[in-house]
Image (cartoon, coloured by chain):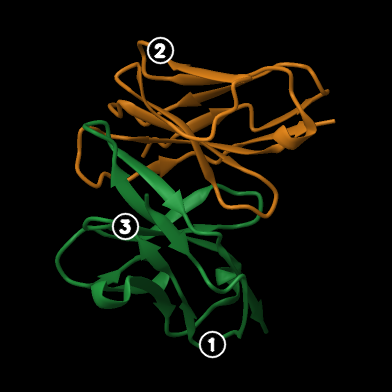
Amino acid sequence: AAGVIQSPRHLIKEKRETATLKCYPIPRHDTVYWYQQGPGQDPQFLISFYEKMQSDKGSIPDRFSAQQFSDYHSELNMSSLELGDSALYFCASSLAPQVAGELFFGEGSRLTVL
Amino acid sequence: AQSVTQPDIHITVSEGASLELRCNYSYGATPYLFWYVQSPGQGLQLLLKYFSGDTLVQGIKGFEAEFKRSQSSFNLRKPSVHWSDAAEYFCAVGALIKAAGNKLTFGGGTRVLVKP
């Protein structure tokens, strides 16, 4: 079965550079979530989109932005990268509206900022 | 606001022994509860979930969890641990975001080490 696809899987950037992560949800899933997991940390919710509109916002820095496109894929744009942005970034997708819907996670994109 | 606490940061267990991972949640309404497993450098895999009904939930890989409303707990158990169960385990509680699905709040995780 098709899963959530994230690209790139690994990314190395310098401080103050920009990075873009992509997420392709499971077919027919219309909701996408972004999570950030720092080293030894639990995943922290950043932002979510439903039907191409932002549906909720968590602890996403102002330097980050995201959007969901007409084909439901999503991109997370990160600018002015800082060392603390080094983390594993997960994308998840689900069907909505659906009470207590299950989230399906991708394998993550590991960003290293040098 | 919802929150999840996993009291044990690390647990070491011998192969073949039983395992129990604790999870306590705080949520104002009926919680939707999940357990995920993460192997090193890998993504999050759903082990099991509780939405309603039977409070004892069976999952994959021989795991089960019991929802106890009176204790606000959702502990994960496995009767006999295999070396491949060494991983980090996350408990999560879900909240409905308006009409747009289910945001998860994760606990801090419990790292399980399996001794031969």
Graded by Cα atoms within 10 Å as few (under 14), some (14 to 19) or many (20 or more), the crowding at tag 3 reads: some
Residue at the spot 54% in from the left edge and 47% down from the top edge? A43
Chain under disc 2: A
Residue labelled with disc 3: B27
Picture residue at 55% right of the left edge, 62% below the top: B109
The quadrant in which the C terminus of chain A is found is: top right
Colour in which the image shows chain B: green
Q: The disc labelled 3 sits on which kind of residue?
A: Tyr
The image position of residue A67, as x and y in percent, is: 46, 16
**A91 up-or-down from B52: above or below:** above
Relative vertical location of residue A60 with respect to residue B9 in this rendering, above or below: above
The span from disc 2 to disc 3 (Cα, nearest Å) is: 33 Å
Q: Is residue A77 visible?
A: no
| Residue type at the position of mark 2 | Phe
Q: Residue at x 24, y 47 (%)?
A: A100
Whether labels 2 and 3 belong to a single chain: the reply is: no
Mark 3 chain:
B
What's the amino acid at mark 1? Gly
Please tell me the numbered disc located at residue B16: 1
Q: Position of residue B26 (x, y in %)?
A: 36, 61
Q: Disc 3 on helix, strand or loop?
A: loop
Left or right relative to A60: residue A55: left
Task: Give the residue pinned by disc 2.
Answer: A69
| Residue A37 point in image, percent of width and height | 60, 44
Secondary element at image label 2 = loop
Q: Which colour is chain A painted?
A: orange
Q: Are both tags, 1 and 2, on one chain?
A: no
Q: Residue at x 36, y 31 (%)?
A: A26
Name the side, left or right, on which A114 lies relative to B56: right
> Which disc is residue B87 wearing?
none
The residues tagged by marks 1 and 2 sit, at their Cα atoms, a distance apart of 48 Å
